[in-house]
C-alpha cells in the first residue's frame, strides 16, 4: 500500500487534513525581530576582496599602509625567531603564523583599546601586535604559567588550544558588555579547522540570535593540520556559513593586509553599531608546518607552497608601497632593523631560565578557592617545605 507523503505545508497548525494548508502565522510578539526573508544582503563577496594593486588602495591613508608594512616585517621576524627558539628547546612547541601575518596584524590594528580579542593558539602574533610583551605571549607555549599575561589589562583572552572554544566565550562577553551599556566589540580568531567544531556553530547561532557585537575572523589557510578544506566543508566558501545563522558574511584575500584591515574595520563597526555580528573568511596560507612537530611534506606539495610564496603578504605590501612611492630602501632597512631588535630581545629574555613559583598554580583558578584546591595547595606547600629542609 502506497503511503501518501505529507508536505511541510500539510503539517502546519491549522491545516484541515491532507492538502495545502491555509494557516496564517500569528503576528510577531512585541520586540521580536521578524525573520529575514531575503538572504542576499547576508551573502559574502563573490570573490575575495583585494585592495593592494587596485584603485581602492589610493583612498587609504599612506601612514596606515606603512604601519601595516612595519608590523608585517616585525611579525615575520617574530615567527622566525619563535620557531628557532623551539628548535633550541626554549619553547615546547610553536604553531607559526608565517604566511598569515596580514590577518594577525590587521586583527590587532582594527580594535579599539576597550575592545576584546579572543585568539587561538596560532594567533600569538596578533596578541603581540595588540601590545602584549612577546615573552608573556609565549609563556604558555613555554610551559611556564597559565597564560602569561593579564587578560583584563590587555582585553585579550588567553590563547585557546582547544579548537573554537573561545568563540562562545567571546559572544557571552560581548553580549554582557552590551547589556551594561559598554560599546566594546569582540573579535574572535579561528582557523578553518575550527569551523568544523560544534563550539563554532553554537557561537554563531548564539551571536546572531542575541545580535551580539562580535566579529568572527576565520583564517582559512587550507589545512586543519593535514586535512584539506575540501574534506572539511562542501560550502562555496566558509563565509557562506554566515547566511544560515542570519548574519553577514565577508570574503577577503587574507594575504592582502590592506584588504583585511578594510574588511575587518567595516565588520567591527557593523557589529558595534548594533547591526549584527559578522563572519569574515580570510583566504590565506600557512607557509610553515602546522607546528615544529609536523611534517607538512606528507600532505602538500612543494609547488603548492612555492605558488603561495609568490603571494607572500610581506612582499605584496612592499611591492605596493614601492610602486606607489611610499617606501624606499631606507624605510625598508629601518623596518628590518626594528624587527631584528625584537628578535634580539626575544633571544636574550628566553636565554634566562624563568624563576617560577609552584604555588602560583593555584592562583587565578577560582575567585574563591574550593576546599579541594586549598587541600591541594597545602599538600604542595608541605612537599616544597620538606624538599627545602632536605637540602
Image (cartoon, helix red, strand yellow):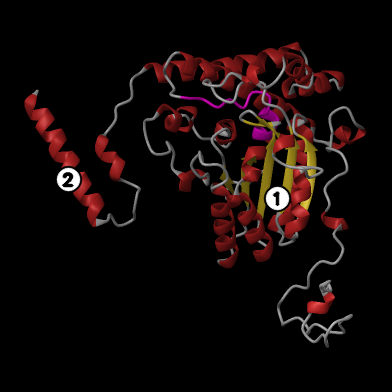
Total marks shown come to: 2
> Quick check: 93 above or below 190?
above
Q: Is residue 53 left or right of residue 192?
A: right
Whether 195 is among the magenta residues is: no
Q: Is residue 378 left or right of residue 226?
A: left
Q: Nearer the viewer, residue 160 or 234?
A: 234
From the image, tell me which residue sits under label 1.
Answer: 268
Mark on residue 378? 2
- Which of discs 2 and 1 lies nearer the camera? The answer is 2
Whether 98 is among the magenta residues is: yes
Q: Quadrant of residue 122?
A: top right
Callout 1 secondary element = helix
Magenta span covers which residues? Answer: 93-105
Residue 345 percent across, percent down from the top left: 48, 18
Q: Residue at x 79, y 38 (%)?
A: 252
Q: Quadrant of residue 117?
A: top right
Residue 311 percent across, percent down from the top left: 78, 22
Q: Residue at x 67, y 28 (%)?
A: 101
Q: Earlier in the sequence, mark 2 or mark 1?
A: 1
Amino acid at each position: 500500500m502506497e503511503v501518501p507523503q505529507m508536505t511541510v505545508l500539510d503539517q502546519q497548525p491549522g491545516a484541515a487534513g491532507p492538502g495545502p494548508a491555509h494557516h496564517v502565522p500569528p503576528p510577531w510578539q512585541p520586540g521580536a525581530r521578524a525573520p529575514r526573508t531575503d538572504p542576499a544582503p547576508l551573502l559574502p563577496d563573490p570573490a575575495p576582496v583585494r585592495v593592494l594593486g587596485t584603485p581602492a588602495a589610493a583612498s587609504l591613508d599612506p601612514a596606515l599602509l606603512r604601519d601595516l608594512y612595519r608590523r608585517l616585517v616585525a611579525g615575520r621576524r617574530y615567527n622566525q625567531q619563535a620557531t628557532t627558539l623551539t628548535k633550541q628547546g626554549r619553547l615546547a612547541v610553536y604553531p607559526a603564523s608565517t604566511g598569515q601575518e596580514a590577518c594577525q596584524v590587521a586583527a590587532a590594528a582594527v580594535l579599539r583599546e576597550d575592545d576584546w580579542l579572543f585568539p587561538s593558539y596560532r594567533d600569538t602574533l596578533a596578541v603581540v601586535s595588540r601590545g602584549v610583551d612577546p615573552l608573556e605571549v609565549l609563556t604558555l607555549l613555554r610551559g611556564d604559567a597559565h597564560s602569561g599575561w593579564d587578560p583584563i589589562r590587555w582585553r585579550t583572552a588567553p590563547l585557546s588550544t582547544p579548537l573554537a572554544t573561545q568563540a562562545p566565550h567571546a559572544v557571552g562577553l560581548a553580549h554582557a558588555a552590551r547589556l551594561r551599556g559598554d560599546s566594546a566589540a569582540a573579535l574572535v580568531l579561528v582557523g578553518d579547522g575550527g569551523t568544523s567544531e560544534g563550539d563554532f556553530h553554537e557561537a554563531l547561532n548564539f551571536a546572531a540570535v542575541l545580535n551580539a557585537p562580535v566579529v568572527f575572523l576565520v583564517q582559512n589557510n587550507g589545512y586543519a593540520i593535514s586535512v584539506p578544506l575540501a574534506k572539511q566543508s562542501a560550502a562555496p566558501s566558509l563565509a557562506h556559513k554566515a547566511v544560515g545563522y542570519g548574519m553577514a558574511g565577508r570574503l577577503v584575500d587574507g594575504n592582502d593586509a590592506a584588504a583585511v584591515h578594510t574588511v575587518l574595520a567595516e565588520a567591527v563597526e557593523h557589529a558595534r553599531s548594533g547591526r549584527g555580528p559578522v563572519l569574515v573568511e580570510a583566504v590565506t596560507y600557512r607557509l610553515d608546518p602546522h607546528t615544529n612537530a609536523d611534517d607538512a611534506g606528507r600532505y602538500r606539495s612543494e609547488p603548492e607552497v612555492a605558488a603561495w610564496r609568490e603571494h607572500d603578504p610581506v612582499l605584496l605590501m612592499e611591492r605596493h608601497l614601492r610602486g606607489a612611492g611610499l617606501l624606499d630602501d631606507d624605510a625598508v632597512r629601518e623596518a628590518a632593523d626594528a624587527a631584528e631588535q625584537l628578535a634580539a630581545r626575544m633571544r636574550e629574555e628566553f636565554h634566562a631560565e624563568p624563576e617560577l613559583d609552584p604555588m602560583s598554580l593555584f592562583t587565578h583558578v577560582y575567585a574563591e578557592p574550593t576546599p579541594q584546591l586549598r587541600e591541594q595547595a597545602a599538600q604542595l606547600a608541605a612537599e616544597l617545605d620538606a624538599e627545602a629542609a632536605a637540602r
